[in-house]
Image: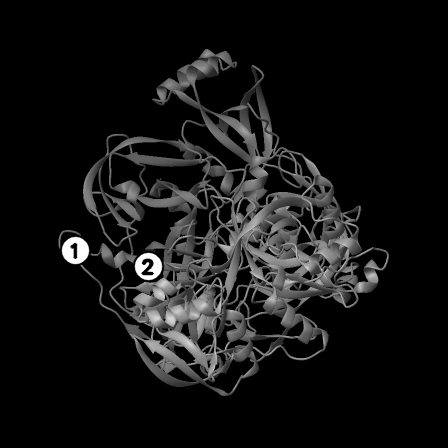
Amino acid sequence: MAPPQLSVANLCITPSASECNTNSSESSPLAQETNVRMGLNDTMSFSSGQNVVSHVVHSVVRVEFAHTSSFDFGTQCVGDATGFVVDQHRGYVLTNCHVAGPGPFWGHVVFSDHTKIRCHVTYCDPVHDFAVLRYDTTAVAHLPIICLDLRPELAKTGVEVILVGNDGGEEINVHSGIVSRVDRNVPDYGPGWNDMNTCYGLVNLGAKGGSSGSPVVSKATGAAIGILTSGEPTGAACYFLPLDMPVRALSRIQERKPVSRGDIHCQFLLRSLADCRGLGLSQEEIDTRRASRACFPGLLVAKLVVPNGFSCGKIREGDILLRVNAEIVEDFVRFGDILDSRVGQALELELLRGGVRINAKVKVDDLHRITPNRFVAVAGATFQDLSYQLARSYSVPIAGVHVCDAEGSFFFGKHMNGWIIETLDKQRVGDLDEFLEVMQRIPDNARVLVTYRNLRNRRDLERTTISINRHWPADMKLAVRNDETGLWDFCNIGSPLPPVKPIQRSASTVKIAQWPGLFESFVHVRCTMPVLLDGFPFKHRTAMGLVIDASRGLAVVSRAVVPHEICDITVTIASTVDLRATVLFMHPLHGYTVIRYDPSLVDANIHTAVLCSEPLQIGSKVRFFGFTGDGRTPLHPTTVIDVGLRTFPVDLNAPRNRVVNVSSVSIDSNLAPQCHSGVLLAADGTVRALWLSTLGESIGSGFVSKPFALDTSSLSPVLSAIRHGAIPKLRMLPILLEELNMLTARIMGVSEHWAVKMGTKNRNMLFVVKATTVLDSNRSGLREGDIILELDGKLCTKVSDFDVMYSKGVLYALIVRDGKELALRLTTTAFNDIETDCAVHFCGALLQPPPLVVRQSLRELPSQVYVSFVGSGSPAERHILSPVTFITHVDEQPTRDLDDFVFACSRIRDDTAFRLRVVATDGRTDVIQMRKNNHYFPPKQWSRDRRRAWRCTSITEQHFRV
């Protein structure tokens, strides 16, 4: 990407990003007349600047916006920017196109007295960086709003200007500078959106994030001469768009006429006469041009011709534009006027190519026609026609189906955007309508072939098979921009076809000579989750699963791959056959999940892994066999170097299911930590331990993967029950264990008698309660610091001695507390009583009862309404509702659980402000003012039906008032 490297989106959205605009004007008779009328003079005194600022501040507004859906070049986000009133009678505000965004917009304008009013997009230019917002003028009838004069002709080099805007999120921030240039080509923002076919102004203002859309005001006249667009992230240079085109568009909008916009699919740059001389312009022509104007900036030169576009084959890169319809055209303003007034017509262009004059006839296309105003959401992803902006940016034809949010079934990995669908289910899809025709014929859960390319690399055609998810969600929704209301209207355009009954297929497995049946005992597991439940940070996970019963189709996989039951699981046999699978059992503490597929649907030599019931010991000789992320399968001998309790620490910034109270095996291997899945094998091929992974602490935007080996002796009782058709209903003591050496135990009150007994078991460790789990019912009876000596009369010398808790409702324990031995009757808790069985989507936030990992991390729960996830571009993100918090009140009404919360929110009307009282995990309380938005974020509920299957339903006010 050529310098200067800027990011418009970052500049306006994040406080740390830079974003700038500038303008200029100089003293002229008209300016002097304006100064007299305003009571100002043309001096540069502080008083003059103060008067101008006090005038401008009543026009400038802070724009609080949210882009609710990824669309075209825009992504879901929230941010603050600036705008200024250009028609106080109709409520028009001028701001940037990258603030309004190409897709659904939800926002407010905030005036100087902090009055906040809902606004919508009236017009967003398809190419240039300006947009017009509109607000309800009756809501600010009490304010002395000033409409700035728009004077693009005053933008000249040397003019002193003032910038008033929301720089750095400070609402009103004033900068001053002098216009350096008004003939600068548009900065290069890199791939994606970019302004073009215009010139920008340059001024050193040093403005940063939040200044986008600020007026660049002449200090002499108080008139706006430009609108800030961007700036150098590492310098003070800022760029502004002159107001010629915004003035034309605004006048058409005020007259309630369409804003015509034309283009010939060619990007031009303003090049100096010296550059044009090198492109073939004669010295005689240069002298003639210079004689016509005192300061001649240059000529328009073709930079990029869109393939298969209207200019393709007629204009070439490097062609100099001399005349249009026999009229000399030397600047973008006149060229733009001609294009906008000749939409659908042909232009006669006179070009200079390598010193030779040529004529070309080029048709003018309608920019609004090649700028998408609709998208389709289906199978977890969103799709649109490829836009002119993206086609120009990547120099590709304006055709194809663009995946603007590659999620769900269409998650291709690697890059998150820029995918173009070539074929779907072996049918070519050239546009969105063809894509919809094919998609409507595909049943739910069908496996189809899709071919696609990425805009960054059009040369390589990629192909894969995907499973079409038409159940989470089932609807296929079409969103169309409504230019009257400024909203995007949604409608359901197709119900899913029922799944086709699968048929049996055959597969051949890979064999290893010295370990027959090893590969045949593994299946590849893919898990896709439509909702980020229990704080799990990923929607897509893959790993290998170990087959524990081939006849019943049972396999065990890490819970870091299948973390909860709201998911679609695909099992691949021998890289040949894909089968759907479901969750059969999840262990709450040991980090593994048992899944089930239909074995009758595959004819393959799948082996049941033989699990050893004897625990590993330090010094045991085993062989490690694992799978790395890049497909390697290391197999090598190793030695067990440690066996003991392992509890993974919790990341309080992003708590998720973690492995606790488990006996983990450590081995001497440098390759094992690189593997996400695997096993430890005995000499006869018996599986001695599973090699699994769990998510560790968060590092930046990613997470550390923590591998561990789970001894099969701890799995055997559970897996044996599952093999015999019983689903274990586990119970648990609500505690976290920690090993305690005998020296510390003696100091804490353990008698010599118990020390001797431990010695006979060849153990110098006891177990102490490190923390207790917060439950809704009474606690088990244990406290932090209790040393557990016996459970049900059995000495507790190893972690497996606590497995008795999984099957009993009451346990009898002998403990040491505060130096005294005590006999306790302990009550266990059923895991089903604390697992997540419901969740609510509200204003973009996912709310649920606190998951087990949160209960393990806190001393008390502020409420049963836990914020597990906050979606991008949502009201929850806009109003800074943070994840990992608890909602205790809605408008001061207590919300003890989700039913209370939904009932309280059902009484709040759409687009109405309300208050949330939230409590963080450290006990800090905050009050958040939020505004409800049911149009883009309708409330939904996830719950289980009578068969314990998850379903998602819409929430209506009437439903929750019953």
Q: Secondary structure at mark 1?
A: loop
- For disc 1, the neighbor class at 10 Å (few under 14, some 14 to 19, many from 20) is few
For this rendering, which residue is in front, 776 or 889?
A: 889
Q: Residue furthest right?
A: 142
Q: Is residue 386 left or right of residue 22?
A: left
For this rendering, which residue is in front, 186 or 568?
A: 186
Question: Mark 2 = which residue?
Answer: 524
Image quarter of the C terminus? bottom right
Query: First in sequence: mark 2 or mark 1?
Result: 1
Q: Is residue 780 above or below residue 411?
A: above
Question: Marks 2 and 1: CB-CB under 8 Å?
Answer: no
Question: Mark 1 = which residue?
Answer: 512
Q: Secondary structure at mark 2?
A: strand
Image quarter of the N terminus? bottom left
User: Which residue type does callout 2 highlight?
Assistant: His
For this rendering, which residue is in front, 885 or 302?
A: 302
Query: What colour scheme has been applied to the protein in the rendered image?
Result: one colour
Query: Residue 182's x, y, as percent?
Result: 52, 58
Image quadrant of residue 595? bottom left
Query: Residue 926's x, y, as percent?
Result: 71, 40
Q: Is residue 600 above or below residue 625?
A: below
The image shows a total of numbered marks equal to 2
Query: Residue 820's x, y, as percent?
Result: 57, 15
Q: CA distance from mark 2 to mark 1?
A: 18 Å
Q: Residue at x 48, y 75 (%)?
A: 329
Q: Is residue 464 visible?
A: no
Q: Is residue 37 visible?
A: yes
For this rendering, which residue is in front, 686 or 221?
A: 221
User: Which residue type does callout 1 highlight?
Assistant: Ile
Mark number for residue 650?
A: none
Q: Is residue 879 above or below residue 244?
A: above
Q: Residue at x 79, y 49 (%)?
A: 113
